[in-house]
Amino acid sequence: MTIELVPLMTATINLREPIMLPNTPSGTRLIIEVASATFEGDRIRGKQKGVAAADWLTVGPEGTGTLDVRATLETDDGALIYSCYRGRLDVSQPVGSAPIYAAPLYETGDERYAWINKIQAVGKGTTDGQLLEYEIYELR
């Protein structure tokens, strides 16, 4: 059995300055709020809905960043979709030099997008610290 990657969307995310909490019991925490986001693909496109979107990133002592992201998306035809994902990032390297890997899940009650409830997505991204761009694929 082989894995097929089907393009789902390109996400462009504008980030706010991180809030840093060093030396917590879990490691260094960075709360990185999303200022705005857009997503575009053949089957889905839209933007971030509201302001409650952020990454609650945890960085371990060896430089492994663990993503914990949640956001609400609104499609260009008005459907609301909850998005959450975990992932990994090597933060021991300078910002922008290591890829960001993510495994998004999506939830909606809108029948037009019910198909998105049943997929597992994967993404690979890059950032300069202010702009984050992901290519996101559906796994089949």
Image: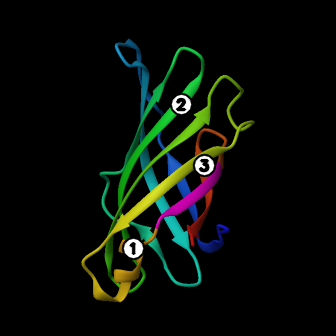
Label 2 and label 3: CA atoms lie apart by 17 Å
Question: In the rendered structure, are the residues bearing label 1 and label 2 in contact, judged by CB atoms less than 8 Å apart?
Answer: no
Q: Is residue 83 above or below residue 52?
A: below
Residue type, numbered disc 1: Lys
Residue on which disc 2 sits: 65
Q: Position of residue 123 (x, y in %)?
A: 59, 57
Q: Position of residue 71 (x, y in %)?
A: 36, 56
Q: Residues within 10 Å of mark 3 (few under 14, many from 20)?
A: some
Q: Is residue 46 above or below residue 77?
A: above
Tell whether 136 sits left or right of 21: right
Pick the residue in front: 99 or 36: 99
Pick the residue in front: 67 or 5: 5
Screen quadrant of the N terminus: bottom right
Q: Position of residue 119 (x, y in %)?
A: 45, 71
Q: Main secondary structure of the magenta part?
A: strand
Q: Quadrant of residue 75?
A: bottom left
Residue on which disc 3 sits: 131
Q: Which residue is pictured at 30% across the width and 51% down the height?
A: 52
Residue on which disc 1 sits: 118
Q: Residues within 10 Å of mark 2 (few under 14, many from 20)?
A: many
**Who comes first in sequence, dot 2 or dot 3?**
2
Label 3 and label 1: CA atoms lie apart by 29 Å
Residue type, numbered disc 2: Gly
